[in-house]
């Protein structure tokens, strides 16, 4: 094994989720028809090797069930300020011995943790 390539994010409405992830800084990598009327929507942060795909076809992964997806930020306070200005609700920054964290929830409740040192 070499690296994590794609992380599946379970959502109810792929288009609504796509707009949210675009709003917070992800880029669209691929959008193409997939099985059962769904789309393969793959997105990534600029210059990142790992990407996400917005899925709605896994029975075992209900929308909103993702926790613990950590996104590294150079300047957490700046990220919080910019996201808040875009209308994104960001939780308060928590200080821990291993860094500062603030949470963001997508439209389905999947929780992303922004991490700044």
Image: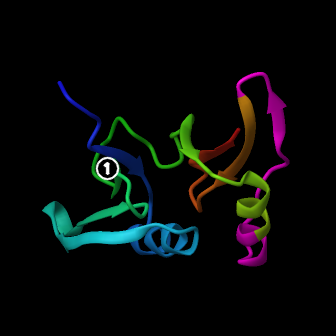
Instruction: Tell me the crowding category of disc 1: few under 14, some 14 to 19, or many 20 or more residues within 10 angstroms, Cα based.
Output: few
Q: Up-down: is 87 above or below 108? A: below
Q: Position of residue 6 (x, y in %)?
A: 29, 46
Quadrant of the rendering where the N terminus is positioned: top left
Q: Is residue 92 left or right of residue 98?
A: right
Q: Which secondary structure lies at badge 1?
A: loop
What's drawn in magenta, residue-wise? 82-98
Q: Residue 35: x percent and y percent?
A: 14, 61
Quarter that holds the C terminus: top right
Which quadrant of the view contains residue 106? bottom right
Quarter of the image holding residue 78?
A: bottom right
The number of numbered badges drawn on the structure is 1
| Left/right of residue 79 with respect to residue 36 in the rendered view | right
Residue at figure coordinates x 49%, y 73% from the top left: 22
* Residue 21 at x, y percent in the picture: 50, 67
In the rendered view, does 92 fall on the left or right side of 5? right
Residue at figure coordinates x 35%, y 35% from the top left: 60
Q: Which residue is mark 1?
A: 49
- Asked whether residue 72 is drawn in magenta, I would say no
């Amino acid at each position: 094994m070499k690296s994590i390539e794609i992380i599946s994010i379970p959502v109810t409405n792929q288009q609504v989720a796509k707009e949210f992830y675009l709003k917070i800084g992800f880029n669209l990598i691929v959008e193409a028809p997939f099985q059962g009327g769904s789309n393969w929507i793959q997105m990534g942060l600029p210059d990142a090797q790992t990407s996400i795909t917005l899925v709605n076809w896994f029975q075992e992964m209900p929308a909103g069930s993702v926790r613990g997806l950590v996104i590294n930020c150079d300047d957490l306070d700046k990220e919080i300020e910019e996201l808040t200005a875009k209308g994104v609700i960001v939780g308060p920054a928590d200080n821990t011995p291993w860094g500062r964290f603030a949470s963001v929830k997508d439209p389905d409740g999947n929780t992303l943790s922004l991490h700044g040192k």
